[in-house]
Amino acid sequence: MLAPLALTLVAITDALRGDAAELVSRACAAARGGATMIQLRLKDADARTTVEVARALIASLPADVPLIVNDRADVAIAAGAAGVHVGPEDVPPSALRRVVPPGFIIGASVGTDADLPLAADADYVGVGPVYATDSKVDAGSAIGAPRLADLIARIRKPAVAIGGIDASNAAAAMDAGATGVAVIRAIFGAKDPEQAARAIRAAMGR
């Protein structure tokens, strides 16, 4: 199980804009600004590229900022990442739990009642999308803060709010019972990821 601090601010990468070093630089900047976990999400990259980027991130991030790989547990294990985050269409946490190494972190996405069983074998859940977002084309409709609170209460696992989260609404997500927030565009799409992460952390603490 994750220490609570690790779920405070999850920074989720966007696509490679250049080489791996450029993405690593932005991820390290996010960590300096207060991101407590990095999730590597490279939807258009092949497995080899994702492993290479993951290894570069692990070598560069602070030891207390774990790296989670999106969707691919095999890639996460090959790279030596701390864990994997899966969605409803991926291999479920219950199946992964039987084959992953001890201590391997499994996160799961939950956005509907039908997704709730995924939480049972997960270490944490990402709940959303809370607000409208175009960072993920398959994110689904925004559920809003009241529905976020309802799902978190029923999940009874550490939960991060995801979907359209930025400094203007992070506090509302925390008020709904989230352990933390997960952010893509507001950090990795920012000109200064370090300052963007710092602003979100400050907003969460209000």
Image: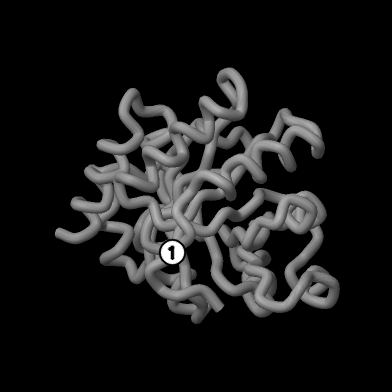
Q: Nearer the viewer, residue 24 or 37?
A: 24
Residue lying at the far top of the rendered structure: 18
Would you call the spot at circle 1 few (<14 residues within 10 Å), some (14-19), or many (20 or more)? many
Image position, residue 189 (x, y; %):
42, 28
Q: Residue at x 72, y 78 (%)?
A: 102
Name the residue that disc number 1 marks: 7
190 sits left or right of 113 in the view: left
Q: Residue at x 44, y 77 (%)?
A: 153
The quadrant of the picture occupied by the C terminus is: bottom left
Mark count: 1
195 sits left or right of 86 in the view: left
47 sits left or right of 61 in the view: right
Is any atom of residue 139 visible in this view?
no
Image position, residue 61 (x, y; %):
48, 48
Q: Quadrant of residue 101?
A: bottom right
Q: Quadrant of residue 116?
A: bottom right
Residue lying at the far left of the rendered structure: 206
Q: Nearer the viewer, residue 77 or 148?
A: 77
Is any atom of residue 4 visible in this view?
yes
Name the amino acid type tagged 1.
Leu
Q: Is residue 9 above or below residue 43?
A: below
Q: Is residue 18 above or below residue 119?
A: above
Q: Nearer the viewer, residue 152 or 82?
A: 82
Q: Residue at x 72, y 29 (%)?
A: 44
Residue lying at the far front of the rendered structure: 59
The quadrant of the picture occupied by the N terminus is: bottom right
Q: Is residue 147 above or below residue 103?
A: above
Image position, residue 27 (x, y; %):
46, 39
